[in-house]
Amino acid sequence: MVKLIENEILKTFYKKRIHVIAGILLVLIALFAYGEHYTLTRTQDRVAEQLGIENAEDWKNIIGQQLQDLERRLDNPYIPDEGKASIQVRAEQLRFYLDNDVSPIGSTAARFMGQFIEQSIFLFLPLLIILLAGDMVSGEVNSGTVKLILTRPVKRWKILMAKLLALSMLEMFVIFMMALFSFAIAMVVFGYSGFNEPVITGFRVFEGQLDTSAVRTIPQWQYLMMTYAIGYFVAFVIGSLSLMVSVLVRSTSASIGIMMSTLIGGSFLSFFISDWKLTRYLFTVNLNLTSYISGSFQIVEGLSMTFSTLVLLGWSFGAIGIAFLVFTQKDILA
Amino acid sequence: MNTDTVLSLKNVSKKIKGRPIINDISFEVKKGQIYGFLGPNGAGKTMTLRMIVGLIRPTSGTVEICGHNTRKDFVRAMSNVGCIIENPELYEYLSGSDNLELLRKMEPDISASRIDEVVELVGLSHRIHDKVGTYSLGMKQRLGIAQALMKKPELLILDEPTNGLDPAGIKEFRSLVKSLSKEQGMTIFVSSHLLSEIQMICDEVAIILHGRIIKTSKVEALSAGQKITWNVTNVAKAIKLLADDFGVEAVKDTEETLSAFTDDFRIMEINSAMMSSDIGIKYVSRQQKSLEDLFMELTGGETIG
Ligand SMILES: Nc1ncnc2c1ncn2[C@@H]1O[C@H](COP(=O)(O)OP(=O)(O)OP(=O)(O)O)[C@@H](O)[C@H]1O
Ligand SMILES: [Mg+2]
């Protein structure tokens, strides 16, 4: 089995698929970093202008004032305990900025890495994975080499299993490249890593309301580990779906085309998500998992981290099941 | 089952979308034989080979390779088989040696040095590190043969292997097949639509037409018959004489000629019988039998198309 997986990984590398993906990643991350840098300078100027201060370096005074304000509210006996929890968290974050001399308006490599995965998890990352997985089986049917591997003394399910395992390793490699490239480029552009900066997380939805009683801060590196792990999970789900489509159709272009249009078309349906209950079982509307931990999600009754994860797992297992069933039974006529 | 049967098909049929493609095929290939599988385009040769190597499932019937049922014990059955079905299939973006290395890892035990051996055998040593995308058709064919031979298979299955080879390549291929059979005792199953090719290399042959085996026989028995044409004064009388006295079925070709399939040694007998029955013979000619003639003979006039 190890040798079979090795073969599959070798094929992907020789086909230069990984090179293409790495190239796309580099270009996009560089553009994203440039854009981020550009908006930041603009924002800093604007903020400085609004507050009537000479330059944005005076942020310390402003943060200092905000912190004092928060501390006063903490002493206020009329604010309920749940409210105090979130104030405490916010104060803790501000204190970090002051203590470590990090501007909250500026950017750091860690913040950039977080933003990049948050922004790419529901569309860009899936597209890359489709590119990677779309021809795993259909590519071999296309070129006829499927006849070669299916006439070896190896059971068909083992061959597909090797492809699935190779794919999950390659997905991990893509996520790793994403992290590495965005870190390296952000370090060049922003010059500060900021892995210890506290990030607020722990948002929940309770009875249709955003519940902030459980919010807390965790260091950036921990937050990044979580978001990139979630990124990997999403990649795996999309990978399984692409693998299934790749088994079902004969041509690589059809396989990639079908997955891409489903992904993009399916994400439009999130417009109807609050009214049309069925749409929430689509995989496309559940991909934005990182929004649940960053607190930037749209509140929809019944949608939660657990719900979305389960829906995605369901799709993934279903797809893998169908892929194995069809692949082990089908006649190779082409 | 006989222990020296390497390949056996029993009542194999295949329907695709309700249309029968292969109908109730049965035959056996013995160890060490070069067995030909002869049929015109569209007869079902490739389809049958696909079933033998497990690319498609028979609708009914069984295939056994070295005693292992290909459905129930695919791995053991296929560990005895090297094959090329239709075209050699290669990863164009890999070099020749990487292609072989990839397959080596899918087989239980092939030594690394075996790769050099087969590359040498098919005469590809000078280009083996180039990308397969840059190979000519003949070179791809050779690499395909190397792939099939790599594991020293008990049974070698080749589908129209001389397609795309030049005359020198074809000659080389024939001698390779013969030496594999003679020196390594390899059993070889080869399909073709050329009677002459089968006659030149095979011991035994199964002939397929419209998805049915219409004859299996020793190759000598096939080539014994030749097409003889007589130009005579009384065609009808001659046909009757051939049928009554010699049991040979003759066909009227033109007003003056008739033809029939028969062996050399009978021609003289037939000629003298005709003369003694007052049938004047202007000339007699002999032709090597073509596949069309063979089918005429076997099916009694049904055309191939
Ligand atoms: N994918 C397919 N679906 C349905 N029928 C098919 C398919 N492929 C081939 N056939 C039919 O199966 C029959 C046998 O085809 P096959 O390829 O086995 O012929 P063959 O004997 O190998 O001919 P050739 O000498 O041209 O290679 C043909 O009638 C063909 O039309
Ligand atoms: Mg064919």
Image (tube, rainbow, N blue to C red):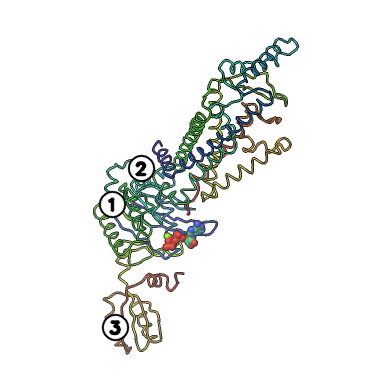
The amino acid type found where label 3 is placed reads Asn
- Mark 2 vs mark 1: which is more N-terminal? 2
Query: Residue under mark 2: which chain is it in?
Result: B
Disc number lying in front (2 or 1)? 1
Numbered mark located on residue B162 in the image: none
Residue A313, quarter of picture: top right
Most extreme residue toward the front, as rendered?
A54
Characterize the local packing of mark 2: few (<14), some (14-19) or many (20 or more) Cα atoms within 10 angstroms: some
The amino acid type found where label 1 is placed reads His
- Mark 3 vs mark 1: which is more N-terminal? 1
Disc number lying in front (3 or 2)? 2
| Residue B180 position in % (x across, y down) | 27, 54
The amino acid type found where label 2 is placed reads Glu
Q: Are both tags, 3 and 2, on one chain? A: yes
> Which residue lies under the disc numbered 3?
B271
Q: Nearer the viewer, residue B145 or A220?
A: A220
Numbered mark located on residue B107 in the image: 2
Most extreme residue toward the right, as rendered?
A78
Q: Nearer the viewer, residue B72 or A240?
A: A240
Asked whether the residues under the numbered discs 2 and 1 touch, taking CB atoms below 8 Å apart as contact, a structural biologist would say: no
> Which residue lies under the disc numbered 1?
B126
Residue visible at 42% across and 73% down in the picture: B300
Q: Is mark 3 within 8 Å of ligand 1?
A: no
Residue A62 left/right relative to B95 = right
Give the spatial CA distance, label 3 vs label 1. Answer: 59 Å
- Mark 3 vs mark 2: which is more N-terminal? 2
| Residue B266 position in % (x across, y down) | 28, 77
Most extreme residue toward the left, as rendered?
B183
| Residue A241 position in % (x across, y down) | 56, 40
Q: Nearer the viewer, residue B69 or A293?
A: A293
Q: Is residue A310 above or below residue B60?
A: above
Query: Residue under mark 3: which chain is it in?
Result: B
